[in-house]
């Protein structure tokens, strides 16, 4: 069963919106918490939402359990093979009315595929989020996030989100508390900030 995530965030000492995905670009999330991160992003994007996952995938979004306003806007696509999945991603990114495209490719993304996705996102003015296996992303991605749940007491759900690739800025790491009962996402602490130059565009 997927998390029913909270969508209100309090940030006391961080930049105004540290988790905002740059529009008209394609981003990646890896780790055991990548789907929760995708749901969080879906709640923050307006307009139609497209989620593309393989037909053989066992877990699919439970529309009634999604954050308020997400299920009504979500369109699920389940292509039968990887070639069709990549085609669906590119076409969905080109669809101008779409607010966010979430996809779960089964195979590592090539540089060519990543560049095609970026061009499609620019053409459609759409944001993309690829949910990838660890180290299976494309060098063309705008940002790459590592998302992991953390052990916590029964009253809270901690997540560790690390921005491990960022073409536009520094790399950072946060610990968040998602408490479904309070309907809020709270910053617990900064897990550390690494002052490194962004990886060069490839």
Image (cartoon, rainbow, N blue to C red):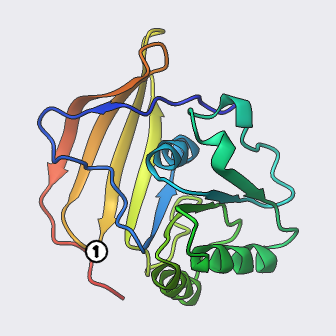
Q: Residue at x 65, y 73 (%)?
A: 92
Residue 79 in the image, given as x and y percentages of width and height: 83, 67
Q: Closer to the camera, 34 or 71?
A: 71
- How many marks on residues? 1
Q: Is residue 131 visible?
A: no
From what the image shows, is residue 127 above or below residue 16?
Answer: below
Secondary-structure class at tag 1 = loop
Q: Is residue 16 visible?
A: yes
**To which quarter of the image does residue 76 belong?**
bottom right
Q: Residue at x 37, y 44 (%)?
A: 161
Q: Where, quadrant-wise, is the N terminus in this rendering? A: top right
Residue 137 in the image, given as x and y percentages of width and height: 52, 70
Residue 188 in the image, given as x and y percentages of width and height: 25, 26
Q: Closer to the camera, 139 or 59?
A: 59
Q: Residues within 10 Å of mark 1 (few under 14, many from 20)?
A: some
Q: Residue at x 66, y 33 (%)?
A: 2
Q: Where, quadrant-wise, is the C terminus in this rendering? A: bottom left
From what the image shows, is residue 120 above or below residue 169?
Answer: below
Q: Residue at x 37, y 60 (%)?
A: 21
Residue 178 in the image, given as x and y percentages of width and height: 42, 25
**To which quarter of the image does residue 84 belong?**
bottom right
Question: Residue tagged by mark 1?
Answer: 167
In the image, 160: left or right of 104? left
In the image, 12: left or right of 102? left
């Amino acid at each position: 069963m997927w998390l029913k995530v909270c969508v209100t965030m309090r940030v006391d000492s961080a930049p105004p919106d540290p988790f905002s995905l740059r529009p008209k670009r394609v981003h990646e999330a890896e780790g055991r918490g990548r789907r929760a991160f995708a749901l969080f992003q879906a709640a923050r994007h307006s307009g139609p939402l497209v989620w593309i996952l393989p037909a053989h995938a066992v877990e699919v979004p439970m529309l009634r359990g999604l954050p308020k306003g997400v299920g009504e806007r979500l369109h699920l696509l389940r292509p039968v093979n990887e070639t069709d999945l990549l085609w669906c991603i590119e076409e969905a990114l080109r669809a101008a009315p779409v607010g966010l495209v979430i996809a779960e490719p089964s195979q590592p993304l090539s540089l060519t595929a990543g560049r095609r996705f970026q061009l499609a996102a620019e053409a459609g003015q759409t944001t993309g989020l690829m949910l990838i296996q660890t180290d299976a992303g494309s060098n063309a991605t705008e940002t790459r996030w590592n998302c992991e749940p953390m052990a916590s007491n029964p009253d809270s759900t901690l997540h560790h989100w690390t921005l491990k690739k960022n073409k536009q800025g520094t790399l950072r790491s946060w610990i968040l508390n998602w408490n479904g009962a309070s309907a809020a996402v709270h910053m617990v602490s900064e897990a550390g900030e690494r002052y490194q130059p962004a990886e060069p565009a490839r």
